[in-house]
Amino acid sequence: GAGVSQSPSNKVTEKGKDVELRCDPISGHTALYWYRQSLGQGLEFLIYFQGNSAPDKSGLPSDRFSAERTGGSVSTLTIQRTQQEDSAVYLCASSLELADTQYFGPGTRLTVL
Amino acid sequence: GDSVTQMEGPVTLSEEAFLTINCTYTATGYPSLFWYVQYPGEGLQLLLKATKADDKGSNKGFEATYRKETTSFHLEKGSVQVSDSAVYFCALRLLLSGTYKYIFGTGTRLKVLA
């Protein structure tokens, strides 16, 4: 079956612009997770959804970051007024239930010029 | 604060050599521990996990034991193959105040030479 998909695979934007990153989880997976992988850094956990609900948004790096999930499926990570330090690979993962094995997507590479 | 520290890479080994990648953690409460692997050109995938002290996770010849006394979860393999060349990430999961928190190490690149 299809795995986790993310779009776009690459995004180049100018500083100050808004960007939307999309994640399509594996069908039937109730939990969805967002991570950021910066050059030379580990994976930084951003947020997770159980269904459409995100119980803890404290992992989001700043108030320019927001995420939503609708219909218990697709999720969007939005970064407003992008900064150069937002350049990273943004990874999405999903799991059947919360705390089950996570399956990762290929990531979106974001470059802010 | 909560953290994961793993050895810096790259680690370069000859085929059939013994592998150890060190991982230590700092955590409030009782975390679950994981090793993830990212093969070249592929997405991150779970390699093995352990959910309580003294548990041993194993998969594909890799092993790691949850050592609470030393707060460690070192990854080992007795005989590496070229196909094991990848980046390995140690991670923990904590349940705090009813919500989950995930912390990953910076990754260790392994290169196995034929």
Image (spheres, rainbow, N blue to C red):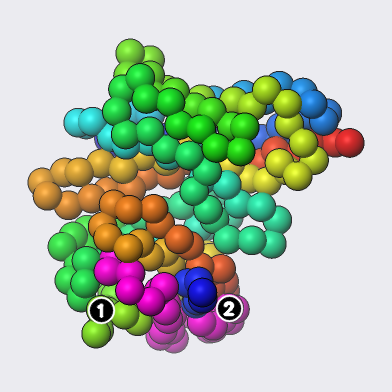
Image position of A2 with respect to B48: above or below: below
Height in image: A42 above or below A64? Answer: above
For the C terminus of chain B, the image quarter is: top right
- For disc 2, the marked residue is A9
- Against A103, is B82 above or below? above
Q: Position of residue A101 (x, y in %)?
A: 39, 53
- The magenta region covers A7-33
Direction from residue B50 to residue A63 in the image, left or right: left
Q: Secondary structure at mark 2?
A: loop
Whether residue A81 appears in this view of the structure is no
Between residue A28 and residue B110, name the one nearer to us: A28
Residue drawn at 12 percent across, 49 percent down = B98
Q: Looking at this rendering, what residue extends furthest in the front direction?
A: A1
Instruction: Please tell me which residue is depicted at 83% across the width and 28% down the height of the picture.
Output: B14
Q: Residue furthest right?
A: B114
Q: Nearer the viewer, residue B31 or B105?
A: B31
Which type of secondary structure does the marked residue at label 1 adopt?
loop
Q: Residue at horizontal 38%, vertical 33%?
A: B50
User: Which label was assigned to residue A111?
Assistant: none
Which chain does the residue under circle 1 lie in? Answer: A
From the viewer's perspective, is residue A37 above or below residue A78?
A: above
Considering every residue shown, the one lying at the far left of the view is: B97
In reply to whether residue A26 is colored magenta, the answer given is yes
Q: Amino acid at mark 2?
A: Ser
| Residue type beneath disc 1 | Gly
Residue A72's disc number? 1
